[in-house]
Amino acid sequence: MKREVPILITLVSGIFCLIGFFVPHPWIHDLYGDVQNWGIVVVGCTYVLGVANLLRINLRQAQRREGDWIYKIVLILGLLTTMAIGFSEGNHYSDVHSRFQWIYLTFYSPMTSTMFALLAFFIASAAFRAFRIRSPEALLLAIAAFILMIGRVPLGNAISHYIPDAADWLMEIPQNAAKRGILIGAALGVMATGIRVILGLEKAYGGGGEGGA
Amino acid sequence: MLGVERGRAGVHLPAAVSVVFFLCSLLLASPAAAFPLRARDTPNDGGGSITLEWTAPAPVAKEWVLVRRERGGTFAPVITIEGTAHSFRDGAVQTGVFYEYQLVAQPTDPQLDSEVSAPTRAFAAWFDRTKLNVLVVAGIFFFLLFFYIRQAESGVRWSFRKIPGLAAIEEAIGRATEMGRGILYVPGVQEIDDIQTIASMILLTKVARMAAKYETNLLVPANSPGVYTVAEEVVKSAYADVGRSDAYRSDQVRYITSEQFAYVAAVNGIMLRERPAANFLLGAFFAESLLLAETGHSVGAIQIAGTANVHQMPFFVVACDYTLIGEEYFAASALLSNDARLLGSLKASDTVKIFLIAVIVAGSLLLTFGQSWLTGFFATQ
């Protein structure tokens, strides 16, 4: 039963959502919307489990004085303080001058920007490796990248107007063709995976088992 | 007498002319000069909407006030529309109730007003005909799926091309075991309702079973509590399946945060501290893909990535040892399992792909010769 019930729920809700995609009639479509809202409610409830897991693991690591334990304390204090201030401000937590917004803009936002800014350095190091020409394919990649990069800056147009045109051609024809090929394959993969899950051929949920594994 | 007659005739002639002019002007100003307003139920919707179309003769009004009444009722304004508009969808009507509409010119000029439309009612459709093409392809896919599953059950076997990334999964876990280091499995940054995350959970089952079998430490940091809940169940079940329930630790699967870059910071921190020997980046990734993959590369881990997000694939191709691209990612679980029914679904997928390639070629040829019906049928926007 532990295995059959989840498969049955998946089958019924999967087929219902499939029908809901094609039928706009309110009898079906309203219920289809309700089913999707149930999903949001379930995900909302899992936040309780998630936060409990976060606290349990980090408290334990701090208690055992594991490596970098001081950061676990910072994390837990940050989480609890932010939650307490957010709850104390009720519906006004997102007001411009609320303390919750102050925490968000003063601490969280700069840290996020810093992480994102690191991408520039990572791109540079990845590009260095990518453009090492070790095969004919890598040579093609390097040539295409060179045309594209120089065609996207004013220097390319200053050298010749053919360079931006070539860059546009690369993006619109070969790049688009490859991308659409990948997308069509991925879309069919999505359908196949969805049907396998709906029909219970893939049994990752509800106790694994060897079926489909 | 004659003079009198003449006098009478002299009086009556201009009067008759003015009557004729008056009638002519009435004719010109009569409703026959107003333009028609066509109202019809908006097709392929769930009701509650009527579409109006018109072609106003020049000169058109600066603005129109659309007025509406239930059949037999009195007109009330609905909305003011630009004078140059030719259509409007009224989405605030009750399904099943008959309505009549009229466009009233602004500034007021009754000569520019439209006719009153014929009574029309909105009704709910049972099938969205714009999705007929999707239904056709899905129908073909379903038919082929069941056909090939049946064939697989009767003993037919097919061969599929080898995907190096899949063969490398066991190699990566074996390497981690030999080095005495752990495995890091990152299931993407989307919710559990995303198909890429679902596919990732299926692959996690295989990876967790191998990790449990080889007694290698597996760590799964989750970006969403929904994914955390499912991943925990998946890993726990995988350990139980290979008889290693005792080896499962509750901190192997952990919820980190739902914030994208905070998650990246945490996972990169784990990579730098734990220095896993194998990284699996399987799921939906966005701007964080390269941040994760480059950090993994810097700690010397063998990295296997898979995603269907086209814009992130180049980053994974550059920074990872193996990348499952698009359909390979979704086919991975079936190929790893070697289950005949799952392979049947791959065969169906490949056959539909051949069908779609044929449709693309035929559509291109037809379009070249001025026939757009095939491309029109498969248009989705």
Image: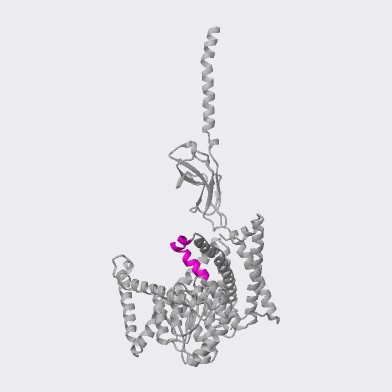
User: Nearest the camera: A128 or A19?
Assistant: A128
In the rendered image, which quarter is residue A11 located in? bottom right
In the rendered image, which quarter is residue A18 located in? bottom right
Q: Examine the rendered structure and indicate whether residue A84 appears above or below residue B60.
A: below
Count all numbered tags in the image, as a single digit: 0
Kindly identify the residue that appears in the image at 47 percent across and 37 percent down. Answer: B110
The spot of residue B118 in percent (x, y) is 56, 44
Residue at the front extreme, as displayed: A159
Residue A150 in the magenta stretch? The answer is yes
Kindly identify the residue that appears in the image at 53 percent across and 38 percent down. Answer: B34
The residues colored magenta run A143-159
What's the magenta bit mostly, secondary-structure-wise?
A: helix
Kindly identify the residue that appears in the image at 52 percent across and 55 percent down. Answer: B48
Query: In this image, B222 relative to A93: left or right?
Result: right
The spot of residue B179 in percent (x, y) is 48, 92
Q: In the rendered view of the protein, which quadrant contains the C terminus of chain A?
A: bottom right
User: Nearest the camera: A121 or B363?
Assistant: A121
Residue A70 can be seen in this image: yes
Q: Examine the rendered structure and indicate whether residue B320 appears above or below residue A182.
A: below
In the rendered image, which quarter is residue B364 located in? bottom right
Q: In the rendered view of the protein, which quadrant contains the N terminus of chain A?
A: bottom right
Query: In this image, A158 relative to B324: left or right?
Result: left
Residue B378 in the magenta stretch? The answer is no
Residue B126 can be seen in this image: no
The spot of residue B299 in percent (x, y) is 44, 84
Check the image and tell me how it is coloured.
one colour
User: Nearest the camera: B211 or B279?
Assistant: B279
The spot of residue B60 in percent (x, y) is 49, 40
Q: Examine the rendered structure and indicate whether residue B57 appears above or below residue B148.
A: above
